[in-house]
Image: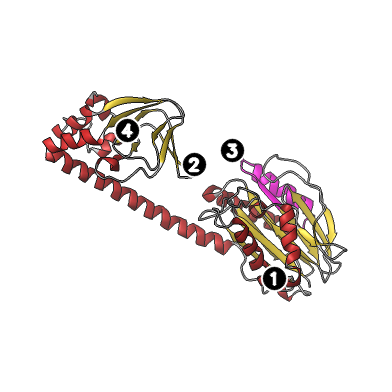
Amino acid sequence: MNAERLRSIPTIQEFFKIDPDGELKEGTRILLEAMEEVQIAKGEDIVTIGAESEDGMYIILSGVTEVLDAKGNLINTLSVGDFIGELGLINDDRRGATVRAATEVVCANISKSLFEEIASANRKIYGTFMNMLYTKTTKLVTERERIKSELAVATKIQAECLENDFTEFNRHQDIRLKAAMRPAKEVGGDFYDMFMIDEDHMCFLIADVSGKGVPAALFMTMAKTHIKNYAMLNLPLAEVAERANNQLCYKNETGMFVTAFICVLDLRTDDVTFINAGHNRPFIIDEEGHFSMIPAKVNLALGMMEGIPYREQHFKLAKGNCIYMYTDGVTEALNPAQEFFGDAHLEEVLNKHMEQTGDVDGFIENMYREVDDFADGEMQADDITMVFLSRR
């Protein structure tokens, strides 16, 4: 290939330490000129997981590729200037991932045998390549450690934003409360909250932000703050939802939204006023003494459309009853057969643990265990969050 064409690509300049205004070093020039242009049709593999690495290294000149793991899950995308399989030039390991053309792709390629032939004739080329590879690997490791450290801090901050001491609530008229959130990534988009509006009114809620990871966590923080701030003004719950929704719609160019089930319990009358903003319906114990899903009309999720009204609805949560709230990470948990946990199975396992409803900690632990047993090692794809309030 034309070495001058390749040297203009910034990632090649960085990897080979090329001075854009200087002369190419002989070894670098020989290596670049030895590369051949290859064209890959959309949908074809450039490298395939488990395959030998004799085809060596590729540098993308045009197009976009997808990096897939052993199960075919997308783990990264690569585009112009990205390197593929550079380690294949210096070791005998098989390919660790599949790289598939998402569009038509043009690459510069050098095979392992050609690289070894050139390196044998000029040992400086091999040493130079090893130094460049070491520099790139060190940089990647340093960057990963930085990201890992920042995510650890973000995880800690998010955990501190969610209530984990329920002592205050458990003092009120036989209330026993427990909540937990297990994110699918380092940080999650699910959240819950509970707080006393005044001496007689307690707000508790569960919510699920669209998406995962850091963006969802940031949107979650805004949503949680808006809901609590407006609720603490002792406004009607419908107005709380309307105002929070309008704030989340404001400059929401990413189109993120949050489903939420927001409740206010009147401790004097046992009446619960609630708003269902597109969320999974909770379960309470019905007149026959079994867990069943609350009948509830559904309003639009928060953050989707400004200026829409929200409908207040009601149910009783008297002494002797309890409510189980959850996000779709529970019902959409998958097992190895790719079957969903589902609403019907959730109702079944809730009733299975009916006798433990007075022990809120044990009850939540049992419910997480049921989900894990069902998943049977299948990777958790979504945040799993539960809130359980018992007056038994």
Q: How is the image coloured?
A: secondary structure
Q: Are marks 1 and 2 in contact (CB under 8 Å)?
A: no
Q: Which residues are magenta?
A: 234-260
Mark 4 Cα shell of 10 Å, populated few (<14), some (14-19), many (≥20): many
Say the numbered circle drawn on residue 59.
Answer: 4
In terms of sequence position, does the residue under pointer 4 or pointer 3 come before the other?
4
Residue 387, percent across and down? Answer: 69, 62
Can residue 22 be spotted in the picture?
Answer: no
Mark 3 Cα shell of 10 Å, populated few (<14), some (14-19), many (≥20): few
Q: What amino acid is found at the position of numbered circle 2 in the picture?
A: Gly
Where is the C terminus found, in terms of image quarters?
bottom right
- The one nearer the camera, 67 or 211, is 67
In terms of sequence position, does the residue under pointer 2 or pointer 4 come before the other?
4
Q: What amino acid is found at the position of numbered circle 1 in the picture?
A: Val
- Marks 1 and 3, how far apart in space? 40 Å
In terms of sequence position, does the residue under pointer 1 or pointer 3 come before the other?
3
Residue carrying label 2:
72
Residue carrying label 3:
253
Residue 147, percent across and down? Answer: 41, 53
For the point 78% across and 71% down, the residue is 391
Residue 212, percent across and down? Answer: 56, 48
- Marks 2 and 3, how far apart in space? 31 Å
For the point 55% across and 59% down, the residue is 158
